[in-house]
Image (cartoon, rainbow, N blue to C red):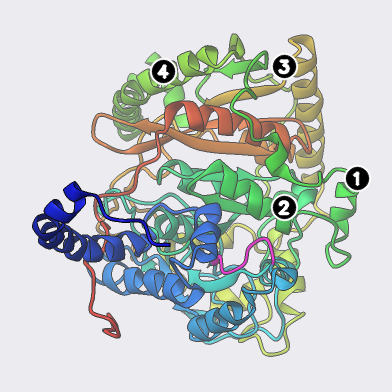
Amino acid sequence: MRPTPTVAARVLFPILFPVVSAVLCLAAPLRAAAQQFDVLETTIASVHAAMENKRVSCRQLVQAYLDRIVEYDKAGPALNAIQYVNPRALQEADSLDAVWGSKAVRGPLHCVPVLLKDQVETKDMPTSYGSAIFEDFVPQRDATIVRRLEGAGAIIIAKTTMGEFASRYVGSGPGIIRNAYDPRRNPSGSSGGSASAVAANFGLVGIGEDTSGSIRGPAAVSSLVGLRPTLPLVSRFGMMPANPTQDTMGPMTRTVTDAARVLDVIAGYDPNDPVTAYAVGEVPATYTAALKTTALKGARIGVLRNRRDAVLASDSAVRADPALARRDSIARETNAEYAKVRPLFEQALADLRAQGAVLVDSLQTPNVPGRRVGNSFETEQATDQYLAQHPNAPVKTLQEILLTGPVNPWRARGLMEYVGRSTSDPDYLFVLTYREALRVAMLKLMADHKLDALVYMTYDAGTTLIADDVLTNPRPDDDYGRGDNRGLSPSLGWPALTVPAGFTSDTLPVGLEFLGRPFAESQLLGFGFAYEQATKHRRPPRTTPPLPARPAGASRSR
């Protein structure tokens, strides 16, 4: 039996019906707009939730990133962060859409568009190492990290530009890579392309390589999270080496959680890189288990304040020497930049205390006795052995690289220092003994003070302006690396995590870096997560805003 309408309902219905209908008609486009998925600053979890709710397909997600690359990489601010776009990205997205309904075949990185540094081999795209010499070189194999990412459901959406043969931010192949926050400035190196691309939301996550700081430096100046893992944790098989006893790869992301999710996939033993056998038994079920807002409570963290940029060591004797006037000028300028960063460091320390950390302040990096020698002994041997694995490589030795063609003058000058040196040289012993003495001294420092980690700024100064002659001058006047504190982690082989720590008065991003003992990634990610959630410093660059909506079926291809 139907209920009988009340008198009020019979009276009001003719009046309210047109009003309700109009409201519903107006609400329809609003509901449709609410269903649109914005890729700007999204995360892996947000993407998967949106796919589950049918708010976005894998194809739509990938297309949105491809649109941003078209709009902003070579046009707009012209960041020049992308070397190659995967021509099969949309096809791969369609394949992943086809299996999304079956949870049994989903991977933890299902339809995660990855921006991969062009130092890493892909058998279906060129791998150039930032050099015009290798512009058309397509390896016959995939790197282990590529196989693991794709096996987890990720899509390599693009290869990112890099400093030539893993140094700085320029190369004979890509040219100049630019910082997404200020394209007049450098993005640090050599993973500057990955950093600018992730910061500008050209993909969901990135992969960088770190020999002396090439993940953490670019991440710090791009308001990103960058993790340099413990040396044996992530396989380097399929990556052109620089110094094998320092080289490693790791995630570059906009959030700590996404860094942990990527590390879950890429970490672990690989028989093709025997050093990763050290990682057996050291990899947790998931690094995300450590991501707690209370992770800093009770943590003992040592504060390193001593600046490790040699330029900042300028003293009165240096200032009195006219022959060193340029260095003195750099030192004064760097000290002015340091004054902009120091308040952010002090605020970061206050934020750590507010989250319950116990800070042991004003510690000094141990002064290890002996002679420190730059590690220029491994590169030529490692490069020649690597190229010998590729029968289709255009050159087969480091010497051929230097004799063949258009290496950037700055990089050619640096590579020349490696020629003729090897690990058989007696001076290489000083490198190994210094490192081991430093490890013992650092372990003692942490043990004496009962420390869980150390903290410092990744850079004590903002990133610098790009010199006009950076593509032609073997000694460009760009003050590159000013205020650099990245060297401790590579010398030790220990993990280090940089997280966004805010912006200077001239709106340049800076990074706070945590350093831990070997295989302390879970702990560092926990500390970084708690700090990130308490401060929320990450914000996207203004140079690459959201794209205006485009008509269905329209393309932004240029």
Q: Amino acid at mark 3?
A: Leu
List the residue tagged with mark 2: 264
The stretch drawn in magenta includes residue 110: yes
**Element type at mark 4:** helix
The label on residue 451 is: 3
- The foreground one among 269 and 217 is 269
Q: Please give left or right for residue 194 compared with residue 547 in the image.
A: right
The disc, 3 or 4, on the residue closer to the chain's N-terminal end is: 4
- Give me the C-alpha separation between circle 1 and circle 3: 23 Å
Q: Secondary structure at mark 2?
A: helix
State whether the magenta stretch is mostly helix, strand or loop.
loop
- Please give the residue where the numbered disc 1 appears in the rendered image: 281
Q: CA distance from mark 4 to mark 1?
A: 37 Å
* Viewer-side label of 1, 2: 2
Look at the image and tell me whether residue 375 can be seen: yes
Say if mark 3 contacts mark 2, CB within 8 Å: no
Relative to residue 447, is residue 292 depicted above or below?
below
Q: How much space separates mark 4 and mark 2, taking CA atoms?
A: 31 Å
Span colored in magenta: 107-113
**Residue type beneath disc 4:** Gln
Indicate the position of residue 413 as horizontal and vertical percent values.
49, 60
Q: Nearer the viewer, residue 128 or 479?
A: 128
- Give the residue at x 28% y 63%: 33
Secondary structure beneath dot 3 equals: loop
Furthest-bottom residue in this view? 392
Residue 139 in the image, given as x and y percentages of width and height: 66, 83
- Mark 1, Cα crowd under 10 Å, few <14 / some 14-19 / many 20+, is few
